[in-house]
Image: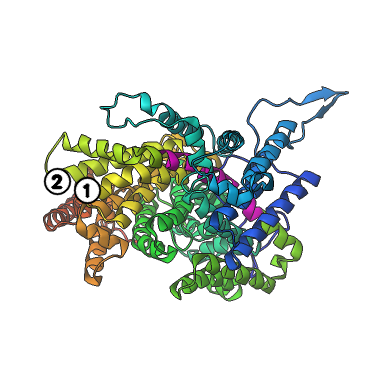
Amino acid sequence: MSTVEDAEPVAVSTDPPAVHYDDEERPARTLTGRVGLGVAVVAFAAALLVLWQVFRPLSQGSQFYLIVFLACTLPLAFLVYRSGLPASRSRQVEGRQLRTLDRPTIPDWLLAAGALLVCLYPLNPLTGGYDGFLDRQGLLDTPDVIAGAVMLVLVVEACRRTTGLALPVVCLGFLAYGYYGGLLPQDWTIAHSGLDFAQIVDALYNSGSGFYGTPLDVAATYIVLFTIYGAVLDLSGASRFFVDLSVAAFRKSRGAAGRTAVAAGFLLGTVSGSGTATAVSVGAVTWPMLRRAGYPPEQAGGMLAAAGVGAILSPPTLGAAAFIVAEYLDVSYLTVLGWAMIPTVLYYLGILLAVEIDVRRFGVRAVEAPATGAGRLLLRFGYHFSSLVLIVVLLAAGQSATRAVVYATMLAAGLSFLDRRAWLTPQRLFTALAAGVRGVLPVVAVCTAAGIITATTTKTGLGAQLASLLVSGARAVTDDPAAVLALTVVLAAVALAVLGLAVPVTASFIIGWVIIGPALLGLGVPAPAAAMFVFYYSVLSEVTPPTALAAVGASAITGGRTVPTMWQALKYALPAFLAPIAFVLTEPGEYLLGRGPVTGIVWTTAVAILAVGGLAVATGAWVPGIGPAGTASRILGGIAGLLLLYLAPGTIAAGVAALVLAAGIALLQRRRRGLSRTEPIGGAA
């Protein structure tokens, strides 16, 4: 991609969408020929099934639909994703190098066929059909157990192919606990009576808490529709427009390059809903600008990673786990969007403050501006915002999230005809729908595998037991209720951060909610605050060293060192790590989710903004509007940020005093050095 060159910069290829729709996946095959067409046809059929379910739900019920949906998608995972096993290498024949075609192998086809059979087994008319299968719940026949066992193996393997080894190992650990937990000493908190293999298979294969539980229901009902919407929006030219608009909007500012990267990350995230993919997509466009402006590679990579992760945190298309939040708490998706509004503002405020500080610290230069202004772009291509606005309007009007996103998809497809280079012809619409379903395959594998975790915790009571251990550990240190809550929150934050290093965001939220959620709820934390706390820490694994996938992707674009890039990303995203703690520590913290009186929401937001400013001083070594911050000012700024986020009268007063003192010391040091006053943040060069 390139920056704006003329009045109509949106150029759309007829190739499949280049945006990756979820970052919980490993690289997929690029299938061509008859195999590629066959996979696309099946994915397209699955997309039609999903759309049909929105308006004419199958009469047999939700679980029947999930069985059919999984039968359409699970086999595709074995064809689209490689096994990761050693393959035959290229060899020299008559002086020419012949490369092995990247296409499914015979074992891949066998696994896909097996997945299709075991997925459809519950509908087998020879064994009583779907109703007969449900009637055998708790009393499975031997063929049922065999089919369920094969399904278990295939689900774990599909998860390994799409996301790596970590989550399958976790799932196997939960299975081992379910089977062998009865052998533990019964005076242990986590001991249980034990489950035999048939009971485990029954809980996974023929219950509402296993493979066909809430996680898969969310993936098949909500997430797939948003991936289809993202694919349609991308092919309609929206991705290029969002990036070009970000470039044009800040073209006269010295901080234009950094601001462009942040704005483009926010806008492009509405298309991909993926942190790593957004960071890479934005980096491919903005890194040349950032380099010319004078940003070091690690600094630029950290900024891109943080801006990309903001895509998962920002309305109106939050990450996949947000739909599970809505389902678990039995609230509308619009309600979850409302909870995310103020934290999103705080997150991007922190990034923008860091960007403006870096402009001054690194002597960032202005870059050559494009000829086309933002106003002209908006007049020509501003219609791309219409579908995003429509989603919010329809949700506010009481429409379901599924219908809202379908109507928005239809609008985006119709508006594509305003630009002849982006027309969604029948062939390109077929491509978009198929790409949308292909994009959800990793999420389907993760959510189906997550059923192993939820079923095990439900059958054994493990979630409540681990929550009790967590709280007991905090109470072993102190008996003060406020201190117990604070220590539990810190332990929970560390546990979620560590968990997120190993498993994808969606799985991290599900595991965190069944284990850490009960601990927070038991200490009196409101359910919305507890759920959003777990959600944010699950997402932030994308910028948490030593994995930090978004930072790894960004460093590949900028050529910077990977580990320093991770630490820079952590610096930019720091407010997002601390704000969720404010949700749960004090009662006013819930106001940051937009829950409570207007006056409470206003004053807590104002205090949180000051806290973000204090953290920016600590991490950026610069006081906005004054100049460089010495060690004392940075320490005081960090202390101020922490105190202000506690949202109690005494800590707020102390935090404001520390912030004023930090600014005063920085001002005194500047005068001693005889420096002239720097321009205020936000001024143009």
Residue that carries the numbered disc 2 in the rendered image: 481
Q: Magenta stretch?
A: 435-456
The residue type indicated by label 1 comes to Leu
- Residue 225 belongs to the span the image colors magenta: no
Residue, x 28% and y 61% (percent of image)?
A: 592
Q: Is residue 556 left or right of residue 585?
A: right
For the residue carrying disc 1, how many other residues have a C-alpha within 10 Å: few (<14), some (14-19), or many (20+)?
Answer: some
Asked whether the residues under the numbered discs 1 and 2 touch, taking CB atoms below 8 Å apart as contact, a structural biologist would say yes
Q: Is residue 615 left or right of residue 118?
A: left
In which quadrant will I find the C terminus?
A: bottom left
x then y, percent, for residue 320: 48, 53
Residue that carries the numbered disc 1 in the rendered image: 523
Residue, x 27% and y 32% (percent of image)?
A: 189
The residue type indicated by label 2 comes to Pro
x then y, percent, for residue 401: 50, 65
N-terminal of the two: label 1 or label 2? 2
x then y, percent, for residue 627: 27, 53
Cα–Cα gap, marks 1 and 2: 9 Å
